[in-house]
Image: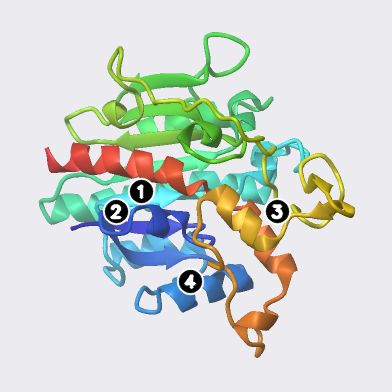
């Protein structure tokens, strides 16, 4: 079975989505509640915490160099909610740290006579249009170019492809077209130095499009880390007997594709039934949409097995 390492692991949408397809060899998460969720569901997978320490650990062979590297570095630096400070935000610079991790993995795999790693990265669409061209810097790092790549227009397109020392492809996907009742647009990037293009993982052949279901039910706006904690259009259900109410954590889990109660764990010396809602909302809102990752994961496995 193919192996993967996960950075900014959160509550591990990837492990839920790719169960039986790929096997995690390590996580990297520092937030207390997500760390507890990981320890609860995946006690045998080591969590190495601070991702900035990973390149040296990989080079020194303290941790494996996996087939796949997965991560959604903090999106707040590129979102309106995070004031879009981009690379001036230390969270945005973690995106560049990701490149150092990928380079370390590829170095070890080259020494061992293995094919290069395949990267899967996720973030908010706002990364495509920052004033400092953060996405161009990211692409240049992946492609091992000295200068940031430049879009042909004022912003990067919703889908694209670059071929250099690595092949890189990106595409915006919306969770509502993968069976979830939530509008959640995210940009996904795949990259690898393998000789066969990884673009086929994200970019389909003509006539082989992602199937979109006609939905009769209401579609929720994008869940955020603050979902369920304030009354606005994205965090309430309208039409209950007694008026408005907050979404429950279990409802948020369902809107992201997680099993019911996935984040209801024993936490800080309290039993699972007393697990506080606030960290659950935050962890769920910061995660990835499970069905989208499953679709990408299946296509990635097909690519890796050929």
Q: Disc 3 marks which residue?
A: 225
Asked if marks 1 and 2 touch (Cβ < 8 Å), the reply is yes
Res. 186 in view: no
Q: Residue at x 54, y 63 (%)?
A: 260
Q: Nearer the viewer, mark 3 or mark 1?
A: 3
Q: CA distance from mark 3 to mark 2?
A: 31 Å
Q: CA distance from mark 1 to mark 4?
A: 23 Å
Q: Disc 2 marks which residue?
A: 105
* Among the two numbered marks 1 and 4 on one chain, the one whose residue lies closer to the N terminus: 4
Asked if marks 1 and 4 touch (Cβ < 8 Å), the reply is no
Q: CA distance from mark 4 to mark 2?
A: 23 Å
Where does the image place residue 131, in percent across and percent down from the top left?
69, 25
Q: Disc 4 marks which residue?
A: 38
Where does the image place residue 205, in percent across and percent down from the top left?
28, 17
* Most foreground residue, 162 or 231: 231
Q: Quadrant of residue 283?
A: bottom right
Q: Secondary structure at mark 4?
A: helix
* Residue 134: mark in rendering: none
* Among the two numbered marks 4 and 3 on one chain, the one whose residue lies closer to the N terminus: 4
Q: Secondary structure at mark 1?
A: helix
* Among the two numbered marks 4 and 2 on one chain, the one whose residue lies closer to the N terminus: 4
Q: Nearer the viewer, mark 1 or mark 4?
A: 4
Q: Disc 1 marks which residue?
A: 102
Res. 27 in view: yes
* Among the two numbered marks 3 and 1 on one chain, the one whose residue lies closer to the N terminus: 1
Q: Nearer the viewer, mark 3 or mark 2?
A: 3
Local packing at callout 2 (Cα closer than 10 Å; few below 14, some 14-19, many 20+) is many
Local packing at callout 1 (Cα closer than 10 Å; few below 14, some 14-19, many 20+) is many
């Amino acid at each position: 079975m193919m192996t993967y390492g996960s950075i900014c692991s959160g509550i591990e949408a990837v492990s839920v989505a790719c169960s039986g397809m790929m096997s995690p060899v390590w996580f990297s998460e520092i937030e207390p509640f997500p760390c507890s969720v990981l320890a609860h569901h995946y006690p045998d997978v080591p969590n190495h915490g601070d991702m900035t320490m990973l390149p040296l650990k990989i080079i020194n062979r303290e941790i494996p160099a996996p087939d796949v590297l997965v991560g959604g570095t903090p999106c707040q630096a590129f979102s309106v909610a995070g004031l879009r400070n981009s690379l001036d935000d230390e969270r945005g610079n973690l995106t560049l740290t990701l490149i150092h991790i990928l380079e370390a993995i590829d170095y070890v795999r080259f020494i061992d006579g293995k094919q290069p790693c395949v990267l899967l990265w996720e973030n908010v669409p706002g990364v495509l249009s920052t004033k400092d061209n953060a996405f161009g810097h990211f692409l240049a790092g992946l492609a091992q170019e000295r200068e940031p790549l430049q879009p042909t227009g004022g912003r990067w397109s919703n889908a694209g492809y670059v071929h250099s020392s690595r092949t890189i492809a990106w595409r915006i996907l919306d969770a509502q077209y993968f069976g979830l009742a939530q509008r959640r647009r995210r940009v996904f990037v795949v990259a690898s130095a393998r000789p066969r293009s990884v673009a086929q993982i994200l970019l389909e052949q003509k006539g082989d499009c992602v199937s979109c279901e006609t939905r009769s039910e209401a579609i929720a706006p994008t869940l955020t880390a603050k979902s369920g904690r304030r009354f606005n259009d994205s965090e309430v259900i309208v039409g209950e007997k007694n008026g408005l109410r907050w979404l429950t954590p279990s409802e948020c889990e369902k809107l992201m594709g997680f099993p019911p109660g996935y984040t209801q764990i024993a936490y800080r010396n309290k039993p699972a039934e007393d697990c506080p809602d606030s960290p659950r909302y935050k962890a769920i809102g910061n995660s990835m949409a499970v069905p989208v990752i499953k679709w990408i994961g299946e296509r990635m496995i097909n690519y890796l097995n050929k």
